[in-house]
Image (cartoon, helix red, strand yellow):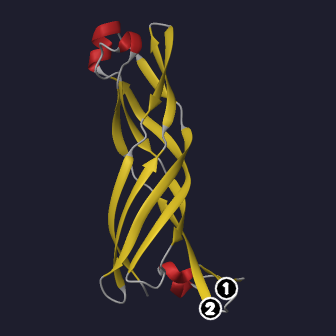
């Protein structure tokens, strides 16, 4: 088995990290392993259930879930190169505030959401536009679960929060 590592010039080329293995008939097959780090921030709403089901929105929070995935590329030399990936994310919750509906229902409330660790799954494809430019399309599932702590006049309540978004991506890639 031969493992090839990228040079600085190869870093943008998805073929930069290749593992080659010899088949019994001495034909080489190439398995491509890639890595991707995504950073994005979005605002989300926490909805009430159970005793708080009458409150449409409990709180609003911003999330930053840096996500690292490792990808397996099936057809590294084709013009259309599908891949799958799996990885991990660490979600940071910030600027979390009780909604106006919650404050009207139970009074002034502070809300805190714990940062969390989750998994990510990914599927996508790279499509050659030219020899040096390719279109990337992908979808990711990011597992984001946390516990929200609501403090209303000293009374503490906790709620399990599941965000779990599907993230759709479109991008352009360049080979040097």
Q: Residue at x 34, y 24 (%)?
A: 47
Could you tell me if residue 11 is visible in this image?
Answer: no
* Residue drawn 70% across the image and 87% down it: 24
Decide if residue 90 is in sight here: yes
Snapshot quadrant of residue 95: top left
Residue 70 in which image quadrant: bottom right
Residue under pointer 2: 27
- Measure the C-alpha gap from mark 1 to mark 2: 6 Å
Left or right of residue 165, residue 75 in this image: right
Q: Give the left or right position of residue 134, taking residue 161 as reference.
A: left
Q: Could you say whether the residue bearing mark 1 is in a helix, strand or loop?
A: loop
Where's residue 158, x and y in %?
50, 18
Above or below residue 115? Residue 66 is below
Marking on residue 23? 1
Q: Quadrant of the N terminus?
A: bottom right
Badge 2 marks a residue whose secondary structure is loop
Q: Residue at x 29, y 83 (%)?
A: 129
Quadrant, the C terminus: bottom left
Q: Residue 152 placed where, x, y %?
A: 43, 10
Marks 1 and 2 close (CB-CB < 8 Å) = yes
Q: Identify the residue shown where x is 37% and y is 76%.
A: 173
Nearest the viewer among 4 and 158 is 4
Q: Is residue 50 above or below residue 37?
A: above
- Classify mark 2: residues with Cα within 10 Å, few (<14), some (14-19) or many (20+): few
Residue 133 pos. (x, y %) = 34, 83
Please provide percent x and percent y for residue 8: 56, 84
- Residue 60: image tag: none
Q: Residue furthest front?
A: 25
């Amino acid at each position: 088995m031969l493992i090839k590592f990228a040079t600085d010039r190869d870093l943008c080329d998805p073929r930069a990290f290749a593992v080659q293995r010899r088949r019994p008939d001495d034909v080489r097959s190439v398995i491509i392993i890639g890595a991707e780090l995504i950073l994005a921030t979005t605002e989300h709403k926490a909805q009430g259930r159970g005793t708080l089901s009458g409150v449409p929105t409990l709180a609003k929070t911003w999330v930053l879930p840096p996500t690292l995935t490792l990808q397996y590329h099936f057809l590294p030399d084709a013009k259309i190169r599908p891949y799958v990936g799996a990885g991990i994310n660490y979600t940071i919750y910030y600027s979390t505030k009780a909604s106006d509906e919650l404050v009207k229902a139970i009074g002034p409330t502070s809300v805190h959401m714990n940062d969390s660790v989750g998994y990510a799954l990914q599927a996508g494809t790279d499509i050659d536009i030219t020899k040096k430019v390719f279109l990337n399309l992908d979808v990711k599932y990011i597992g984001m679960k946390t516990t929200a702590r609501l403090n209303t006049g000293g009374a503490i309540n906790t709620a399990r929060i599941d965000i779990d978004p599907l993230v759709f991506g479109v991008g352009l890639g360049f080979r040097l």
